[in-house]
Amino acid sequence: MKKILVLNGPNLNLLGTREPSQYGATTLPEVEAMCRAAGQRLGYEVECFQSNWEGALIDKVHEYGRLFREGQALGCVFNPGALTHTSVALHDAIKGVEPLPVIECHISNVHAREPFRHQSWVSPVAAGIVIGFGVQGYLVALEGLARKHDAENPHLR
């Protein structure tokens, strides 16, 4: 069974307690359980990983780039948190593992927030972007990733 990585960046371990008016009351373990259940319904194994350390996120992207090339992974749903707006290193890591499809995912609508959140270093190298659907956006991203794969690989259905 192919794997999908659900990757979360800095401070997303605080979901449910950090600014619930902005991010909701759902915790990261609850988001991860939702993603695993959705993956199972779609026929994929979902691995969840969160880190407050940029290098750990880069290592995970590299790992899934290798797994994708080996035919063991479908892609990645990635909420880079605040690193979205600052990390050229994440941009380069994602670009370096192309053609691994990475779906950028944000809980809030970053474009309706502070101007510094409008710039993303991840978007230019992402296969798609899901923004502003709350934690349900992770499920939208997983579904989109699976549909993209199926559309590009009709012989594998």
Image: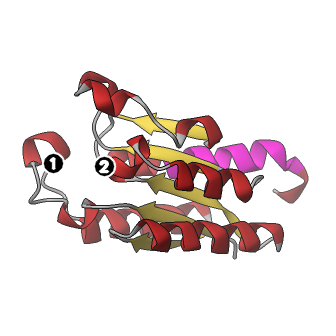
* Residue 75 percent location from the top left of the image: 65, 59
Sequence-earlier tag: 2 or 1: 1
* Residue 150 percent location from the top left of the image: 75, 49
* Drawn side of residue 80 relative to residue 27, left or right: right
**Badge 1: residue crowd in 10 Å (few <14, some 14–19, many ≥20):** some
Secondary structure beneath dot 1 equals loop
Relative depth, front residue between 58 and 110 = 58
* Residue 141 percent location from the top left of the image: 50, 46
Relative depth, front residue between 92 and 133 = 92
Which quadrant is home to the N terminus?
A: bottom right
The image's colour scheme reads secondary structure
Q: Which residue is painted at 58% across and 49% down in the image?
A: 91
Q: Check residue 135 in the rendering and tell me which mark sits there, or answer none.
A: 2
Do we see residue 73 in this rendering? yes
Do we see residue 140 in this rendering? no
Task: Please name the amino acid that badge 2 sits on.
Answer: Val
Q: Which residue is painted at 56% across and 72% down in the image?
A: 60
